[in-house]
Amino acid sequence: MLQDLIHLRDLPLLLLACLVFLSFFFLIRAILMFLANPERQTQRRLKQRLKGLDGIDPATATQTLLKKSSLQQSLFDQILDRIRLADQLELILRQANLSWKTGTVFLLFGLSGMGGGLIGLSRWGLWGGLAGGVLGLFIPYKILVIKGKRRLQQFERQLPDALDLLARGLRAGHAFPAGLQQVAKEMPDPLGTEFSKVYTEISHGMDFNTALLGLCDRNDLQDLSFFTTAVLIQRETGGNLTEILEKISHLIRERFKLRNQIKALTAEGRLSGIILILLPPVLAMILMIINPEYESQLFSHPLGQLMCVAAVFFQLLGMVCIHKIVNIKV
C-alpha cells in the first residue's frame, strides 16, 4: 500500500518530465528541420523572382487549385510532415477511408500510450508502466491497420466484377471515363467510392495518368496495379482495351482460386500454430488458478523472471516462424 502511494505521489512529476521532454524534443526537431531544409534557399529565390515580376501579386501567384494535404494546416502537422512515419500513417488513414488529420491521430496515439502507461505504472510499477505505454500505442495503430486491410480485401473482391462491367461498357461504345462513372454508380463502397474519386478528378481537369496513379497510391493492391498499368500502356501504344480488361479479370479470379486452395492446404499448419501459440498462456492461467503460490515464485524470483522473459521471446519467435511458414504469397 505504501509503495502504491509513493507511485501515485510521483505521477505529477513523471507527467511534468514527459511534457518537458516532448516540448524540447519537438522544438529542437523543428529548428533542425528548418535549418537543414535544402529547399529553403530555392523557395526564397523563387519568391524574390515572383516579387520582381510586374503585374503579378505574390499572394495570388502562390495560390493553387489543388486541395491541400491534411499535413499543411498547422505547425505541428508541418513538423510531422518531415517525419517518414507520418507519410506511412497518412497512407493507412487513406486506406481505412478516414478523413482524420495526421496530427490528431498522433495526439490520439500519445494519449492512449500515456493512459496505458499510467494504468500500468499505478498497478504494476515501472515495468508495468512501460508495457502499458507500448500497448496503448500499439492498440489504436493496429485497429487502423486492420480496418485498412479489411477495406482493401473487400476492394480486391469487387475488382473482377468492376472490370467486367467496365469492359462491357467499352464494348457497347462508351468512353473510358463514362465507364468509370458507370462502375462508380453500380458498385458499392469501397470500389464504387474510389472509382467515383477517379472520375471526379478527371472531370475537374486532372491528368488521366495522375488520377489512375493516385488510385493505386490510395489502394496498394497488386491486382489494381495490373489494371492501371495496362490502361496506361494502352493509352500510349493502342490496342484492344476491352480484351485486356477481360483477361485481367480472369487472371484475378484465377489468383483467388489458387489462394483459396493454398488456404485449404495450409489449414492444418495454421491450426497447429494457433494451438502451439495459445497453449503456454492457457496453461499458465490454469496453473495460477489451481496453485497460485507455486506459480507466484516464477514472477518473484530473479531466475523465474529471467525465464519468463526468455519464454516470451521464444514464444514471439515461434509466432513469426509459423506465420512465415503458412503465409504463402500468390
Image (cartoon, helix red, strand yellow):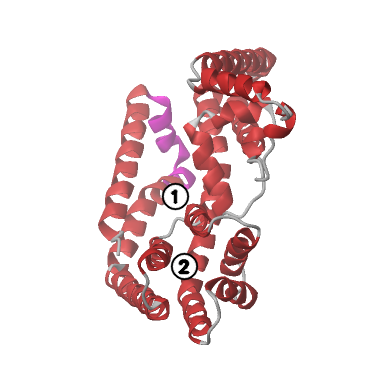
Q: Residue at 62% of width from left, 78% of height from top? A: 186
Q: Residue at 39% of width from left, 53% of height from top? A: 278
Q: Which mark is residue 156?
A: 2
Looking at the rendered image, the quarter that the N terminus falls into is top right
Residue stretch rendered in magenta on the structure: 287-301
Where 208 sits versus 259, above or below? above
> What element does badge 2 sit on?
helix
Where 223 sits versus 122, above or below? below
Q: How dense is the environment of label 2, judged by Cα within 10 Å: few (below 14), some, or many (20 and up)?
A: many
User: For the residues marked 2 and 1, what is the alpha-carbon distance in whole angstroms?
Assistant: 42 Å
Horizontal and vertical percent position of residue 13: 66, 12
Q: Amino acid at mark 1?
A: Ile
Q: Amino acid at mark 2?
A: Glu
Horizontal and vertical percent position of residue 220: 45, 55
Ranked by sequence position, the earlier of labels 2 and 1 is 2
Taking the image as drawn, is residue 114 in sight? no
Using the rendered view, name the quadrant where residue 57 is placed: top right
